[in-house]
Image: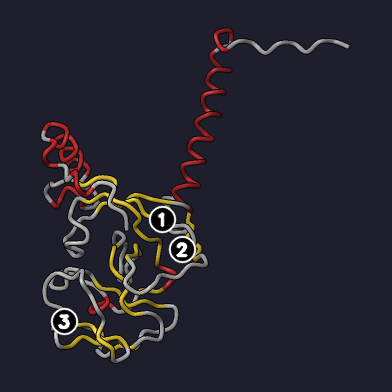
Amino acid sequence: MNAEKPKPAPEHLGWRQKLRREVFAWFWVVLAFLLINGTIGQARVIPSGSMENTLLVGDHLMISRIGYDAGVPFTHLHVQLWRNPARQQLIVFRPPIAGDPPDWVKRVIGLPGDTVDVRDSAVWINGQRLAENYTLGKTARPHFSNVTLPYKVPDACYFVMGDNRENSYDSRYVGCVPRRNIIGTPVIIYMSLDAPGDAWEPGRLRERVFAYLNALRHPGTVRWRRIFRVF
């Protein structure tokens, strides 16, 4: 039998072979990233104070999509999975408003079939006052809203609110969040920077780069005690 020819050492490969090998290796790296990003986890940055003091502007979150949603990155293609959020759980979702706004982070308050009301500076679920120790500001009915309270949450829909009750645009104004819009749930804060809020708005790449560079020069802008906080 003829012996197999030994494979050429990397240093003996031609440039075309080296390029082909490099492209093939990066293909698998990119494919793995897309699979993880689309089905397991994603990163988000908090751009507003609607969830203070639970989440602060500049908190960098890792969210879990496991069981909630699977999608193709950089597209609007999504598939709803088997898990449903629990009451008072934090969720990340595509907001039920017109246009193409960035994802929101809020807290689930009302489940499908619940009757939600806001009175006496508190939330009431099916006639029972909801115990909440995480809110900031007064919980009040909105002055202008398309939502009539008490509100019966439809099937496959969730009533969400921000923890900063006086500075949160949520289901009190826009109605419930369809289950198909829910992407996942925050699991950990992996970085938190005290920087101008506009640095974290969509499209503010220049401001965001400056915020990171400033953190390298001034480590005090990093909220070290918030890093690795889990939910």
Residue 93 screen position, x and y as percent: 35, 64
Residue 177 screen position, x and y as percent: 35, 74
Residue 216 screen position, x and y as percent: 16, 32
Name the residue located 26 percent from the left edge and 51 percent from the top edge.
Answer: 45
**Disc 1 on helix, strand or loop?**
strand
Identify which residue, 98 or 217, lies in the foreground.
Answer: 217
**Disc 3 on helix, strand or loop?**
loop
Residue 68 got which mark? 2
In the image, what residue type sits under mark 2? Tyr
Whether residue 94 is situated above or below residue 226 in the rendered picture: below
Whether residue 161 is situated above or below residue 9 in the rendered picture: below
Residue 142 got which mark? 3
Marks 1,2: beta carbons within 8 A: yes
Residue 145 screen position, x and y as percent: 20, 82
In the image, what residue type sits under mark 3? Pro
In the image, what residue type sits under mark 1? Ser
Q: CA distance from mark 1 to mark 2?
A: 8 Å
Query: On the picture, is 3 further left or further right than 27?
Result: right
